[in-house]
Image (spheres, helix red, strand yellow):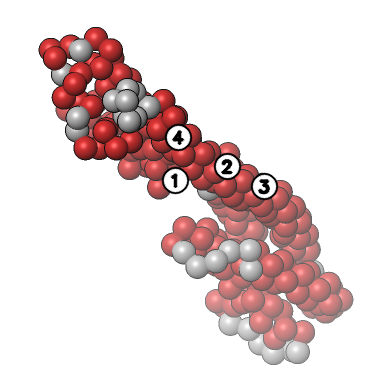
Amino acid sequence: MFKELYVFFEKWNNKSTEHKFIILARIMSALLTVFIVLVIVIDWTDIWGMGNKVWHLRFFNHFFVDSDNKFNWIGITSVLAIISLTFTAWDSRRKFKADLISKSRIKWINEFRKIVAEYLQQVSEYWLLMAKYNKSDERGKNELFLEVNNITTRLQKSLSLIQLQFGEGKRNNEFLEYFEIFSVIVNANRYVINKIYDGEEITKEESQTLLNIDKNCRKHTGDVVEKSRKYLKEEWEKAKKGE
């Protein structure tokens, strides 16, 4: 029994505030309907002699009993109509808002997929170009300098575009961390490549930075695919709920 209660409250806590409100509104509406039906039954059948007592209560006497001391159908119909109209108006507004949010989120998901796909294509180009660069002699490296800088600039532009898609928040920051780490690596490589082009000597650590690009690109591509799939799946679930 306690396990079932725990599961129930766990599911309840996971529901959105609007969803909780809808459930409570429906429960209250059902209880009110049952209560009114019960009162009518008591009045008609006069169970335990309660019919007369119920209608002499000030609340019922004011709303549901006419001047002839008979049940006032207009009163009860008006109350139910007001409740129904209020709930319908609120629910329609809620559905419209949820539909708008859902469509906006789906549009964002589709656009972000395209941005990530283009970004991964650029990472692949960068990966291949850097492999070619590392195998080249000094002259070959100088000839590839402009190409490397061009793809690096495009990568940084895509990284900035991805970052602009997100607001502040722990979940967003954790997701963007994978892109920011790679951005640091790309900038470090650009710094070393510029030194080589200018004829400056590079350190052993800087040389190793270039040689690690294969491993870094492979890991980054895998991380982006995995994390993007997970993130977008969560966003899709929110879109289905209109959150």
Q: Which residue is mark 1?
A: 18
Q: 155 and 52: which one is in front?
A: 52
The quadrant of the rendering that contains the N terminus is: top left
Q: Nearer the viewer, mark 3 or mark 2?
A: 2
**Cα–Cα gap, marks 1 and 4:** 26 Å
Q: Which residue is mark 4?
A: 78
Q: Which residue is mark 2?
A: 92
Q: Is residue 198 visible?
A: yes
Instruction: Where is residue 228? Give x, y as percent.
Output: 59, 50
**Cα–Cα gap, marks 4 and 3:** 37 Å
**Cα–Cα gap, marks 4 and 2:** 21 Å
Q: Residue furthest right?
A: 143
**Residue 163 drawn above or below residue 45:** below
Q: Amino acid at mark 1?
A: Glu
- The answer to which of marks 1 and 2 sits earlier in the sequence is 1
Q: Amino acid at mark 2?
A: Ser
